[in-house]
Image: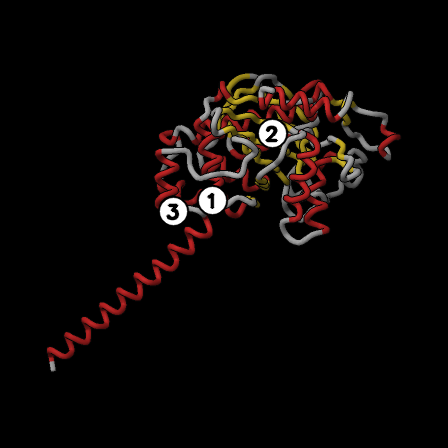
Amino acid sequence: MHRKIKRFIAIIAIGTLLASLATGFYWSLRFMRTTGITPGFIAQLVFDDGIALKSSGSRTNVLILGAAGGDHEGADLTDTMMVLSVDAQKKSVALISIPRDTWSDTLKDKVNSAYHYGEEKSAKGGGMVLAKVVVEDVIGMPIHYGLLIDFSGFKKIIDVLGGVDVNVTRAFTDNEYPIAGKERDTCPGDPTNRCVYESIHFDEGRQHMNGDVALKYARSRHAEGEEGSDFARSRRQQDIMIALKDKIVHPTRWFSFDRLTALPKILDDATDTDMNFGELATVGKWFIKTKESEVKKIAFDALLVEPPVYLYAGRYVLVPLASWDSIHTYLRTLVLGE
């Protein structure tokens, strides 16, 4: 009897082990199918160039969008718009900033409203589809992928990495930076509505920024002089991207097990993308491995002009100084070397 009990326990143990292995195998296959992460991919990412990406020739273009998020009006307007362009053969990387007030003939509105209209009129994912189409019209190059990051997630990503070091090229003060959470507040007795704003200031020079400070640096648009322009803000957003890249490429400055395990959850909660994890990791590898001095930071503000507001229902917008074709030629020359 004692022997039979031992045999029975052994059978149960073996059955449980086999069931666990089968379950683990099933979930491993599902995980690999969903994310694109396989043992082969990990080997490719570490020792080679990662997985194959959608591209035109050897160049892959990713539209990066930043939105405030939340439930207030304008929460899904993408005030940050840039294109990360990676050439796997030439090993070149470019960042193209798109001014948020650029007029879109397709939308009959500013380009930063494309994601909003797409989400409003289509099923989930329509915002990214429309934003990619509109930006393709603006830059004259195909957009292969899109990545949206909400501002709260942006702050968490920087904080979990321990902050970033940014070189502030010009000091500025913004006395009308909107306070998060007060978008719908009123200020009784104050016609200027000052209670919804705070004053922020940045000195010139290299500064360490946590997520909250980095977001203010990237979003500020009401400083006096040059730094109050949309073009200056686009340049600062590029600075943050480069600083973030520099932090990631030096893991000794931020690595810990807790940070590493927290990062995937933060990224998942904060982003909306049409890339699987394998594609995202491959693009990220190309961006991260490129030296800061070799990343082309491109803007085309000199080719834009502010037309009379009465032509656009009283709105401030930006249109080509000459033509869209001239902007397309300018960008292709810088990005593609044509």
Label 1: state its secondary structure.
helix
Kindly identify which numbered label has been placed on residue 38. 3
Q: Tell me where residue 206 appears, x and y as whole percent.
A: 51, 19
Q: Farthest bottom residue?
A: 1
Q: Residue 218 bears which disc, if any?
A: 2
Q: Nearer the viewer, mark 3 or mark 1?
A: 3
Residue 261, labelled with which disc? none
Using the image, tell me which numbered label, if any, was put on residue 277.
1
Residue at (50% x, 24% y) in the render: 92
Sequence-wise, the earlier of marks 3 and 2 is 3
Mark positioned earlier in the residue sequence (3 or 1): 3
- Horizontally, is 105 left or right of 36 in the view? right
Image quadrant containing the N terminus: bottom left
The structure residue drawn at horizontal position 61% and vertical position 23%, both measured from the top left corner, is 235
Which dot, 1 or 2, sits closer to the camera?
Answer: 1
Compared across the picture, whether 335 is left or right of 231 comes to left
Which secondary structure lies at badge 3? loop
Q: Quadrant of residue 193?
A: top right
